[in-house]
Image (cartoon, helix red, strand yellow):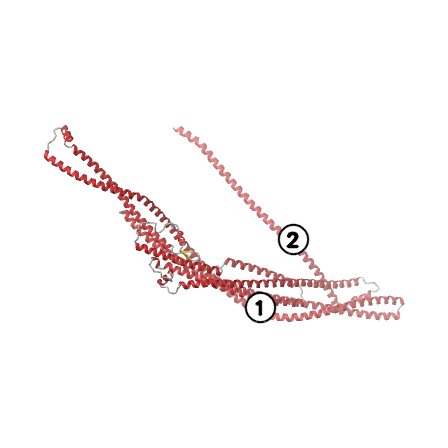
């Protein structure tokens, strides 16, 4: 009785614990779905914000590139202006110097003519002839020099006129461009301040959202840990159930032969009871006869033991034999009654264990049947996943004993049929949703977006470095009017191409927005399906209410109507899913067409870009050639001026003694300003030569410094490698010394043990 009481109490406590566990599991699942929905919404918000931020960054980058190009043009025009001013000043100085030299030469010629006339009247023929020869030679040299200088003056005037025209046009363009750049600079500063404020506000908001998402992730991790614990508990309970079912099978296998034996013993017991009753009747009859015989024969006391023995052997011989038989039969009956009691006790305990195990099995079957309704999958919840659990090999029909009534069996079959229909409808919805997700383009891949963004940023940095190199090259080069016109034409062409690219980017953004809208619709459908599954899971229809399913209506629709949900029509939902699938196919085709068109446009743009690169390379080559020619001409001018200064100095030093006064007059015709100008030109030429030499020396020094740095780095690496090798050697030495010490310690301990054993033996022998 005590066993039965404790078993009933355990049987009453276990369903309560399982019910509380199931309720807690349901609450955790509901919380997990709510948090997943919130997380999905947060992900959508973050993706939308990232999309807006990328658009803003693209617009900002476009504005920055426009400002950079404008600043480049402004800088180039300023450099052109400075170059034109310096050229004009140099040409003016050169022209003034030439005019001054011409005037000096004319005065010298007039003086020499007057001298010749004076000498013609009052000098000898010899002096006259020598002077005439010298004068004629000087006149010829002067005429040649004057013709050459006049030609140079004409060339310089033509170049001056061209430079003046270029200067006026460049000044006008520079003024217009400076006004545009000033206005663009102000606008750019305003936009920068505004975007900086927006970015700070957006960064604060995104940081707050990031903290919220981390908090949600921590909550999800905690709930997932709780769910894992519950799943582990569920697995343990399933293992216990399997063990109990195994024990039930074992007890059933042991119980069947016991039942057969019990039946045989019960039949034998009945036969023995009948025999016992017959023997009791016979005993009663014999005792009655014995009493009658005692009453008739009278009582006399035997005189001796022989008489007593004789009397027992004669009178009571038959009675003693029957008494022995009765005693023997009584012993057999008692033994059989003990056996029957033991069997009845075993039968009672086996029946009780069987009832307990059957009740536990029935409860677990109901519990796991309820658990198989909803299981979370990647797309939502699935009812088929629980079929492969630990106890999937068993079913409701494991116990073949009729524990339930026929009405309950019918209700269960009805519920199973309804459950199968619901699973079929849910699988159809899931297949439609999978088809829709495949046609709409799949999920948002954040890693791929980040990689493409990094690649675009790397390309932008490379292009910026190339632009900086081209700017530095253009700063060092001189350009003429024709190249400026060609550059302006190419700049207009580039602006047209940029406008085309902007239009294509707008179309691409529009297509991306359409794709994102389709994804949002898919997510809404997924959430709707999750809500339907949640309602189906939370609905009390799992209690196996018997519902009729008329033709033309789905069980899910009838269930929604029974629950009071009238805003959901399953047939319309299926039609909408089919329409969405068809529309997704058409949208996919249109997207493919637009994609091919965009690819063709991109190929055209690439070809135009290659053509622009070729033209730019040709113009760069022409610019380099013209720069080299201008540099060569400038160097030639400096060399001529230096040669003129050196010739004047040599003329002053190596003048003849007889014409010292006259040559002194020739050198004195140059003023101090002209001499200073020639000296400055000489110094400038020397400085240019020295700068070239210094640049060459600096280049050689840089190369040697780079080589020295490489060697130092290599030496440092080798030193680090040597240090690492030393550390490894030191560690190996320490390990070796530790191993040797341990080996010596072990050897010392073993030797001590070997030495102590004979001592202990001898001591024991001595004591004994």
Instruction: Please report whichever mark, 2 or 1, sits nearer to the chain's N-terminal start.
Output: 1
Percent across and percent down for residue 440 are: 48, 61
Give the secondary structure at mark 2: helix
Q: Nearer the viewer, mark 2 or mark 1?
A: 1
In which quadrant of the rendered image does the C terminus lie?
Answer: top left
- For residue 282, side relative to residue 710 (left or right): left
x, y (%) of residue 62? 56, 65
Q: Is residue 205 visible?
A: no
Residue 472 rendering spot, x and y as whole percentages: 63, 62
Q: Position of residue 611 (x, y in %)?
A: 63, 63
Crowd band around label 1 with a 10 angstrom C-alpha radius: few (<14), some (14–19), many (20+): some
Furthest-front residue in this view: 551
Say if residue 658 shows up in the picture. Answer: yes
Q: Which of 580/675 is in front?
A: 580
Are dots 2 and 1 in contact, CB under 8 Å? no
Q: What element does badge 1 sit on?
A: helix
Tell me how far mark 2 sits from mark 1, CA to CA: 44 Å
Question: Which label was assigned to residue 185?
Answer: 1
**Quadrant position of residue 552:** bottom left
Label number found at residue 704: 2
Q: Which mark is residue 15?
A: none
For the point 18% across and 33% down, the residue is 321
Nearer-the-camera pick, 13 or 337: 337
Q: Nearer the viewer, residue 111 or 173?
A: 173
The vertical placement of 751 against 6, above or below, is: above
């Amino acid at each position: 009785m005590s066993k039965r009481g404790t078993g009933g109490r355990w049987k009453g406590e276990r369903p309560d614990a399982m019910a509380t566990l199931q309720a807690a599991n349901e609450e955790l699942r509901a919380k997990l779905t709510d948090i997943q929905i919130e997380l999905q919404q947060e992900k959508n918000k973050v993706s939308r914000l990232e999309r807006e931020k990328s658009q803003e960054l693209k617009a900002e980058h476009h504005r920055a590139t426009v400002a950079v190009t404008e600043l480049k043009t402004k800088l180039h025009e300023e450099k052109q202006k400075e170059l034109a001013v310096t050229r004009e000043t140099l040409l003016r100085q050169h022209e003034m110097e030439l005019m001054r030299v011409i005037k000096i030469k004319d005065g010298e010629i007039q003086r020499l003519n007057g001298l010749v006339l004076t000498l013609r009247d009052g000098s000898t023929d010899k002096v006259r002839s020598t002077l005439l020869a010298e004068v004629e030679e000087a006149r010829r040299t002067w005429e040649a020099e004057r013709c050459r200088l006049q030609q140079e003056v004409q060339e310089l005037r033509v170049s001056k006129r061209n430079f003046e025209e270029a200067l006026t046009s460049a000044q006008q363009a520079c003024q217009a461009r400076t006004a545009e750049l000033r206005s663009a600079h102000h606008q750019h500063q305003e936009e920068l301040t505004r975007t900086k404020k927006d970015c700070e506000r957006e960064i604060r908001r995104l940081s707050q959202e990031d903290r919220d998402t981390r908090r949600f992730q921590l909550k999800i991790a905690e709930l997932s840990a709780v769910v894992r614990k519950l799943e582990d508990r569920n697995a343990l309970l399933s293992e216990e159930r399997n063990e109990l079912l195994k024990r039930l099978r074992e007890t059933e296998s042991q119980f069947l032969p016991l039942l057969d034996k019990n039946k045989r013993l019960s039949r034998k017991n009945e036969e023995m009871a009948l025999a016992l009753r017959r023997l009791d009747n016979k005993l009663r009859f014999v005792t009655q006869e014995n009493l009658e015989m005692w009453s008739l024969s009278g009582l006399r006391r035997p005189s001796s033991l022989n008489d007593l023995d004789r009397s027992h052997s004669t009178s009571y011989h038959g009675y003693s034999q029957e008494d022995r038989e009765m005693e023997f039969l009584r012993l057999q009956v008692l033994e059989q009654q003990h056996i029957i009691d033991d069997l009845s006790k075993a039968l009672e305990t086996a029946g009780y264990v069987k009832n307990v195990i059957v009740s536990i099995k029935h409860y677990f079957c109901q519990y796991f049947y309820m658990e198989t309704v909803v299981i979370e999958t990647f797309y939502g919840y699935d009812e088929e996943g629980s079929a492969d659990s630990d106890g999937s090999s068993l079913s409701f029909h494991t116990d073949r004993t009729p524990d339930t009534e026929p009405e309950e069996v019918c209700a269960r079959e009805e519920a199973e049929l309804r459950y199968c229909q619901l699973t079929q409808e849910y699988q159809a919805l899931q297949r439609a949703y999978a088809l829709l997700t495949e046609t709409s383009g799949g999920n948002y891949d954040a890693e791929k977006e980040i990689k493409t963004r990094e690649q675009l940023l790397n390309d932008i940095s490379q292009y910026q470095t190339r632009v900086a190199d081209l700017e530095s090259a253009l700063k060092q080069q001189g350009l003429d009017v024709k190249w400026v016109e060609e550059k302006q034409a190419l700049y207009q062409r580039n602006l047209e191409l940029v406008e085309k690219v902007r239009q294509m980017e707008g179309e691409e953004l529009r297509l991306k927005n359409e794709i994102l809208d389709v994804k949002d619709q898919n997510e809404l459908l997924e959430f709707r399906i999750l809500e339907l599954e949640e309602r189906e899971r939370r609905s009390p229809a799992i209690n196996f209410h018997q519902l009729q399913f008329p033709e033309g209506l789905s069980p899910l629709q009838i269930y929604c109507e029974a629950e009071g949900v009238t805003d959901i029509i399953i047939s319309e939902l299926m039609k909408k899913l089919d329409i969405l699938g068809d529309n997704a196919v058409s949208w996919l085709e249109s997207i493919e067409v637009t994609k091919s068109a965009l690819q063709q446009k991109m190929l055209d743009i690439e070809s135009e870009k290659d053509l622009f690169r070729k033209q730019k390379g040709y113009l760069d080559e022409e610019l380099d050639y013209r720069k080299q020619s201008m540099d060569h001409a400038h160097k030639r001018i400096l060399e001529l001026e230096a040669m003129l200064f050196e010739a004047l100095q040599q003329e002053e030093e190596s003048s003849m003694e007889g014409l010292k006064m006259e040559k002194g007059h020739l050198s004195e015709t140059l003023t101090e300003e002209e001499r200073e100008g020639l000296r400055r030109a000489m110094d400038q030429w020397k400085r240019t030569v020295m700068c070239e030499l210094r640049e060459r020396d600096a280049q050689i020094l840089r190369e040697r410094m780079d080589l020295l740095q490489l060697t130092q780095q290599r030496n440092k690496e080798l030193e680090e490698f040597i240090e690492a090798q030393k550390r490894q050697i030191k560690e190996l030495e320490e390990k070796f010394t530790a191993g040797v010490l341990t080996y010596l310690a072990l050897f010392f301990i073993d030797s001590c043990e070997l030495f102590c054993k004979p001592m202990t033996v001898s001591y024991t022998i001595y004591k004994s």
